[in-house]
Image (cartoon, rainbow, N blue to C red):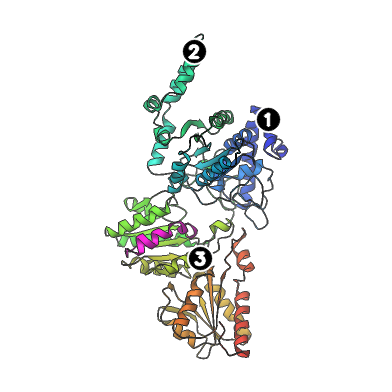
Amino acid sequence: MALLTRIRGPRDLDRLSPGQLAVLAEEIRGFLVEEVSKTGGHLGPNLGVVELTIALHRVFESPKDRILFDTGHQSYVHKILTGRQDFSQLRIKGGLSGYPSRAESEHDVIENSHASTVLGYADGLAKANQQQGHSDRHVVAVIGDGALTGGMAWEALNNIAEAQDRPVIIVVNDNERSYSPTIGGLANHLATLRTTQGYERFLSWGKDALQRTPVVGQSLFETLHGAKKGLKDFIAPQGMFEDLGLKYVGPIDGHDVQAVESALRRARGFGGPVIVHCITQKGRGYRAAEQNEEDRFHAVPVIHPDTGLPVKTAGQDWTSVFGEEMVAIGRERRDVVAITAAMLHPVGLAPFAKEFPERTYDVGIAEQHAAVSAAGLATGGLHPVVAVYATFLNRAFDQVLMDVALHRCGVTFVLDRAGVTGTDGASHNGMWDMSILQIVPGLRLAAPRDADQLRAQLREAVAVEDAPTVVRYSKGTVGAAIPAVGRIGGMDVLRDGGADADVLIVSVGAMAPTCLDAAERLAAQGISATVVDPRWVKPVDPELPTLAARHRAVITVEDNGRVGGVGATIAQALRDAGVDVPLRDLGIPQQFLDHASRDQILSEIGLTAEGVAEKAAALVAKVSLDPAPVL
């Protein structure tokens, strides 16, 4: 790592020779494999952008020039080259974020970890430069080919192309993948560009032949190189970009620093919007990643660096339970189809796709389209299951509301990674879904507490044909099954506190073990507690107000934002029913949470058995001292 230890900032790259740059690239790859294998993180994407990132920082002057990454998981090399080489605490509390972070460095302009947004930022920054007369500043947007499947990217391209005198350099990092191989018409177009060598061979021949021609040869070559797109389209079909008004440069070998530098310097001097198309290999230089066809080690847990195998074998996780049950349902019902937004493996739909490929639709990074397409499928007589991360459903809210719910379409949304997810930081915590979905008329929302309930509630969800249904669950390993000791209405009673119980604890989804532990702690203090799992948290079970009225206090516990969440909705239901029992709603504070483990975050925000018991005991004590309603 002799060269890498000498890099403390981007300008340290300027004095390196081409040979030294090649050595540095290999040192960075070795560093990434060694360090990320210890902590887990996004390994494959970063192994693929080493030379590209080196070239970016040699050509442009960050932070004066704004270098933006979409998505930000491909920014590890950028961090290394901008003075952040302590990866020992990557994605761990107090350590480096797994995405760009403005708190870490002035070189991180945006904290971008949701795909397809970078071109919108670039458009705005370029307009700001123009408005303020900053003609010496450049805006560079690095976007993966997978992110170009998102509609927002094309909305931004339409605006970027509007002004030919407003420079934006768009670097397409084309590795044929988002998580898994990129799909769709755009992917096919890029594949054509990627595999069409005729244009480059033609220009290479022209350069050699014409530059040997005295006097006029160079001028003729430059004319040929700048020929109208009719000639270029005849040889290489790149017209889609140029029809938008975007100068196209490429395809370029993204692992040739000098070639990328040359392309970037030409783009920098053009003075208008330019696309630089770079071909890269995800997982490059790490054999275990290169041979992994699923996702080229897109994101890895802690692994053995020599083998790429996980250090620990985890138990069954929520995602795999969903995947197995989807296959079982698919065998029973031919009308059930699956939709994913470029995340077939991460959301557990790969087994369904393997058995029912003709009933599986990967729409690319396009959650809005996924929802509307699902509405169309439902209108056509099928029952679509749309599986996305909980935090990504935020993008499709309008479509859930106006296209699915308004039309009373039987569409099931399955939300993986709901609640606190932790290590990926603020943008990936699925803490908004149960709040924003509460306002959707007719929608029904389930929060299973264990694997058995996930299977049962998924089946209940796909049985609904006249309204949208949602099933949401946590990230990670599923705990042991939690049996019910009784049922009231549609609610499972997990602990019966008796006829004169002091407090009713309403446990939402994966918080059930915490709530049962809290009830045990309360019992040790002489406070009796009933614990119920509503199973379906929207709508509020009509029996809940009656049950609440038989207790002195109510505590709701949810892995979701407190504002407008399940607790707030239950409080409103009690008021509407004229039940004045004091209630405390416990959940995630409405703030962006720094990256840390799930357990650390839950502890910090008080969503632990100890924290729940403490709040419940305090509320019961207050009621004992002051029998007046506590609002």
Residue 620: image x %, image y %? 60, 85
Badge 1 crowding class, 10 Å Cα cut-off, few under 14, some 14 to 19, many 20 or more, is some
Viewer-nearest of discs 1 and 2: 2
Q: Amino acid at mark 3?
A: Val
Residue in the image at 55% along x and 63% along y? 420
**Residue 506 sits inside the magenta stretch:** no
Mark 1 or mark 3, earlier in chain: 1
Q: Is residue 287 visible?
A: no
User: Disc 3 and disc 2: Cα gap in Å?
Assistant: 70 Å
Report the front residue among 481 and 554.
554
| Residue identifier under label 1 | 16
Q: Amino acid at mark 1?
A: Leu
- Name above or below for residue 558 compared with residue 186: below
Q: Is residue 170 visible?
A: yes
| Residue identifier under label 3 | 478
Magenta residues, start to end = 390-412
**Residue 391 sits inside the magenta stretch:** yes
User: Disc 1 and disc 3: Cα gap in Å?
Assistant: 51 Å
Mark 1 or mark 2, earlier in chain: 1
Q: Amino acid at mark 2?
A: Gly
Question: Which quarter of the figure has residue 373?
Answer: bottom left
Count of number-bearing discs = 3
Question: Which quarter of the figure has residue 136?
Answer: top right
User: Disc 1 and disc 2: Cα gap in Å?
Assistant: 34 Å
Helix, strand or loop at label 3? It is loop
Number of the label disc, if any, that sits on residue 217 = 2
